[in-house]
Structures are given as structure tokens and as C-alpha cells.
Image: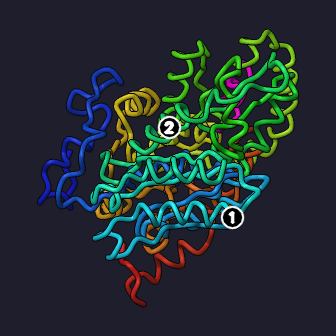
Amino acid sequence: MLLKCDKTIPEREKHIVIKGKGGCTSARTCKISCNIPTTPGDMTERGCTYAGCRGVVGGPVKDVIHIVHGPIGCAYYSWGYRPHLADDDFHLTYVLVTDMDESNIIFGGEKKLYQAIVEASREFPDKKGVFVYNTCAPALIGDDGRDAAKMASEKIGKPVVFFPCEGFRGVSQSQGHHVGNEIIFKEIVGTKEPEEPVVYGINLVGEYNIKGDLKNIQPLFEEMGIEVITAFTGNASIENLKVMHRAKLNVVHCQRSATYIADMMKEKYGTPYINVTLWGIDNMSDALRDTARFFGLEREAEKIIAREKERVAPHIEYYKKRLSGKKVFIYQGAPRAWHWVKLLKEIGMETAIVATTFGHDDDYRKIFEKVRKGTLVVDNPNALEIAEILTEYTPDLFISGNKEKYLAYKMGVPFVNGHTYDSGPYAGFRGMVKFARDIDRAVHSPVWKLLRENAGNNGGIKI
């Protein structure tokens, strides 16, 4: 399918599919072009490899110094990006960058990187190590940042982990997830043994503690008698990551950004893993059951599930009555696009449009499995496509991220930030109530009617 705005880039037709049309009748028969370079002329909303490594995987680690090696503009991306809360919010308070300028491009930036690591370590002596994120500029001029990091590590006596996450390395931020997983696994995991044997230990892999999601999740596992060694990497310390290889099971939440490390741990240490979804009532219940089954703790799990369901049931029913039949447009990075189809049904909403920024084939298979016929599925949409979809398909709610919210506001479309959350946390049983509350507030706010009535009269976008 080709949208009107894409007449000059007909290649986009391969990235837009309607389930039930053109041979797309099931997850097996639906084909969509994805995880390939963006078509020239397409104003993509994708991030780069650096964004995926720094912003998603490495960035939430709380007790290390994060240094961006590159021009100041690359560090700007780090500021206020995703609210990965932690006991120590040092990683959200400070953004450090080598600030490469023209002279460094000519003469090299290795000395500047070495100096930055040493000075930062002296300034923050309580931090347990340094993470260095390499950007395009030093890589293109041939800087050996890894060697500079190695020498600095010897100088400060702490680990300095160098991430070769130059933005040009992949087609999207998804490659940065891969780089982050691989480097942390090779250089940190398994470098220390836990002080005491781990009996019922798990890692919550691909859980980044956005707006404090862990506080809704971790206590439920611990109440069953299961120790959470670490989240990868929400509220994680480098010391936690060192011993995560001793977990008996990896519980994988974000199956796009973190399955890589689960696969590597399975291959090297024999650690099995299960895939779960930690958003929604039924999803969270299944996650607890599947984890409990591995350890033989089914009875404990059922007690917790019954109690939590009873606690949130009246709230869910209240919002379901108010939201039933509403149409939703979900546009997320990748997994949340299919994670959330089921939980939206729990409050009576139907997913009419689904899009991802960097989804792979397996993400789209899961999407096509979960959505009904007639659902529009879009890979890597641009702003013009989003505007056309919002106009032509008139969803009652748009769930997306920071970049898209302003477009939605201008067009008078109810919006919820599913990327960094409006309030949150949204995970777990109690998080589902907050998610439903924010959706209800967005959908039923009177401001949208007023905006539509006045659009075009005072400089607004006419729809």
C-alpha cells in the first residue's frame, strides 16, 4: 500500500501493509520490508546506533561515569532522554562529553578522551567505572579510542568500558542494542563471583526501569522467594552486572534490545531464558506463572496473582466502561507495538494501526499474530505519513513517543507517551491502572474538541 504523501518515494509501498489484503492473511503470509536502510528522501524518525547503545542499554547503569566521545551535539541527545530511574540518579544528573572540535578532527581526539576519563574519575571518585560511547567523528578520523580507554583504566584503577557504537554502524538504533549487549557481556559479565550461592536467582533482562517500573515488578518476584540479581540494565550497578552469569534463569522482557545477551549467556553459561511481557494484567500474571513454574513455586505465584488482580479489578472495569470500542494507533520502537495490543484489549480498546521505528521480522510476525484483519501496519513511518494516518484513519488515541507528541497535539489527537511515559510507572498490575488512567484522561479531555473547533482560525493545523 502507498500513502498519498509517498508518491515521490514509491519504495515505501513495501513498508506499509494492511492485514487481510494483498495476500496478507496471517503472520505466516504477511510480508513487510523492515530493518533495512532508510530510503533516500524519507525523513525517517529512527535513531542511530549510538542512540540505541547509550540511550537504552548502557545509559541506565547507575554507578558509572558515562562519557560521550564526540562533538557536543551527540551529548545533547543524552540529556533528558529516557527517565531510567535509579537509587542513585547520577546517570541522569550529569552528561559528560569530550566535546571534539575542529582541531581534534585534524590532530585526533585520543589524548582528549584519555584526559576526560582521568579528570572525570578524579571528580567523581565514588563511581565504580567509566562507560565510553564512541560516535561517528572519532571513528571516521581513525581514533583508537579503545586503546585510550585501556590506558586510562590502568591510570585510574577502575574498569573503562569502550562501546564502538558509532552512529553509522547500523540502519537504526537497533544495532546499538546489539553493540551494548555484546560489550557488556564480553567485558563485564562473569568478571566476579557472588559472595553467596544463588539458589532462586533471576535476571530481569530488557527491563530499564522507566519511571520506576521495577518497583511494580521486582517485589512480586521477591515475594515468591525469587532473588532478582539484576535488571539489565534498569537501576543496575556494574557490580550487579558482573555476577549476573550466576542467575538460574533469565526473564526477558524487551525481546528486541536484550535477547542478544540472553542468547550469549545461554551459549556460554547454559542459562535458560523465557520471554515475558510485564505490561498488562494477563501478561504480568503469565510472567509470574512461567517464572514460578521453572522454580516449582506455582502456589506462591497464584496467591500473589489472585491478590493483585482483586486489588486492581474495580479500576480496570471502571476504565473499560469508559474506553470500550475506542480505536488506537500504536507507534513504538518495536516490542511495545505488539506487547500492548493485548493489554489494550483488557480495557476494551482495539488497535487499528501499528507502527515500529526499528522492528525486525520477528517483531512484525508477533504484530500480525495479534492484530485483527483491517489493521494498518507500517514500518519506520515518517512525520508526513503519521499526519496522513491520523487524518484519514481518525484514531481515538495515539500512543507514541517524545518526537510525535507535538504533531498529535497540533492535530488535536488524544496522545499518551508510551516511550518515556506521561506519569508511570506503567508495568505490572498497579502500573496498568496508571496506564489506563492516563489513556482515559487523554481520550476524554475537553481540550481536543475545542482545538478541532478552532483549528485553522488561529494558526492551528486544519484537519
CA gap between label 1 and label 2 equals: 25 Å
Which secondary structure lies at badge 1? Answer: helix
- Judged left or right of residue 70, residue 305 is right
* Picture quadrant where residue 394 is located: bottom left
Q: Residue at label 2?
A: 183
Residue 234 on image: x %, y %: 67, 45
Q: Residue at label 1?
A: 122
- Judged left or right of residue 452, residue 92 is right
The reply to whether residue 331 is visible in this rendering is no
Does residue 283 show up magenta in the picture?
Answer: yes
Report the label total.
2
Residue at 52% in and 41% down? 336
Residue 88 on image: x %, y %: 77, 56
* Picture quadrant where residue 280 is located: top right
Q: Quarter of the image containing the C terminus?
A: bottom left
Q: Residue flagged by tag 2: what amino acid is it?
A: Ile
Going from the N terminus, do you reach mark 1 or mark 2 first?
1
Residue at 81% in and 32% down? 309
Where are the magenta residues, as a range? Answer: 279-289
Asked which colour scheme the image uses, the reply is rainbow
In front: label 1 or label 2: 1
Structural crowding at the residue carrying mark 1, measured as other residues with C-alpha within 10 Å and reported as few (<14), some (14–19) or many (≥20): few
Q: Residue flagged by tag 1: what amino acid is it?
A: Arg
